[in-house]
Image (spheres, helix red, strand yellow):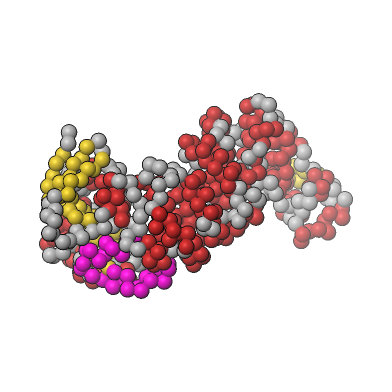
Amino acid sequence: MNIFNRIAGIKILFSNKKIVLVNLTKKNQQSTLKNYKLDTPLFKKILSDELVFLTNVFKKNNYELRIAGGAVRDLIMNIFPHDIDLATNALPDEMIKMLNAENIRIINLNGLKHGTVPVRINDKQNFEITTLRIDVKTYGRHAEVEFTNDWHKDAIRRDLTVNSLFLDLDGTIFDYVNGVDDINNKIIKFVGIPDKRVKEDYLRILRYFRFYSRVKSDCKEHHKESLEAIRNNAEGLKIISGQRIGYELRKILSQKFCDSFMEIFYEFSLAPHMGLPVNGNLEKFKNIYQKSFKNKPLPHTLLSALMNSEEDINKLDERIKLSNDEKSTMLAIKKYENVLDSFNTVEEIIEFFTKQFLIPKSSKEKSLRKEQIVELMKYLDRMDLADQILALELPNFPLNFKNINQHKIFDSNKQKLVTMEDYSKEYKIRLNHLISELKHKWIDSNFSLTQQDLLNLIDEKLLKEKSLYSNSKKQNKKQF
């Protein structure tokens, strides 16, 4: 059923999840503001008791509170927004005063300099409320701001037209930059003059690509002036922190068109400033993306295809600060990406990785985790193997410290049997290294060695050969 609403000379029609606009503004009416009415089930769904309560607090104090930015864009596109950011014409100190008066929990004041106050309502829902502002001075990565009560000024200092909309809880959309038209026409472009917008914050280069994926249905329909501004300001990414670049890059790699975007990153010389290898394997990346994206690989899994060496991974880590899991997974993918060629059967593959999962953590050759190999199988488009690996029940190593401590060993110095507990204290044996050595022998036996078999392997010769004595007791080795 079509839904018609009229407000401020504009009619809005919702049909087949798309907004069709008919402009009824009089020709002599001069205003940059266009108003639309949003009246969809999805919009009504976000009107929680917590949001309504918070809005009423501001109304009671004669201030406005509107949904801002990405949430408005998503609602127009009939996408449920994950976060709801709010904007207000109340100054930060006025906000804090009224919030305290209502006993509303303020989570922190870390963003107060930029007018942002995060709150939690009824211990159920969090919101970030930001005072309207203008950027009075920009430095390419941060800005000095001045607070305002002018919604238009706040809208035109934002990055993209589709992110510069406001929405009242009665469904009124406030559009100062033709953002609704751009959403309907699937246009992604910077607000105002693209070159100026990019120079204000060079991270907007990457945000352009992130939101392009969300709005566009064709990877080649770029806004010419916006793309030219990106090309001309590529070096600006050098001054952006690795954390911010990493955040945007991970978002881009989680969405469609990232193979096309990666071509642009290299063509425009953006890649080196993002920590990507200068001679990244672009063809391999595109191939891996095209065959594996349906498997929903993690962002760093896709990035592995660009890497030519461990050094490339280390340089990326230096730039964007990979997590330990991300880095270890990338290293595992590069090490094992061709390993399937070595086996003839699925059983052989499963047996191989079972052994890799059980390698002791103290070994030079690091053990793998199931999650890493699942990512490898997504990367290789072998989800049949991923499912088997996830379902794999690993055998339990039959030894522990208690078993070893109770085991008796012949002490050639004392010429008698003593427990390993006493022996290890006397000669400073590194028991964790001993267990690691025994675990390797168990793995090499295809897990056939029993607890007693493993205990029977422990003697002074084994301890000496494997250098399990600590440095402080090297003299004890002379007994052999």
The picture places residue 400, in percent across and down from the top left corner, at 64, 42
Q: Quadrant of the N terminus?
A: top left
- Horizontal side of 265 relative to 170 (left or right) equals right
Q: Within the magenta stretch, is there residue 415?
A: no
| Along the viewing direction, whichever of 142 and 401 lies nearer the viewer | 142
Q: Does the magenta run of residues contain 155?
A: yes
Residue 314 drawn at (x, y percent):
61, 56
Q: Residue at x 47, y 53 (%)?
A: 249
Q: Position of residue 263 (x, y in %)?
A: 52, 49
Magenta residues span: 134-159
Residue at (51, 38) in percent of width and height: 290
- Relative to 229, is 418 on the left or the right? right
* Residue 277 higher or lower than 402, as above or below: below
Q: Nearer the viewer, residue 443 or 38?
A: 38
At which x and y percent is residue 250? Answer: 47, 51
Residue located 64% across and 49% down the image: 308
Going by the image, does 242 lie left or right of 102? right
Occupied quadrant, residue 197: bottom left
Give the residue furthest to the front: 27
Q: Is residue 272 above or below residue 401?
A: below
Q: Quadrant of residue 148?
A: bottom left
Front in this rendered view, residue 389 or 435: 389
Q: Is 471 situated above or below 464? A: below
Q: Is residue 117 shown to the viewer in this render? A: no
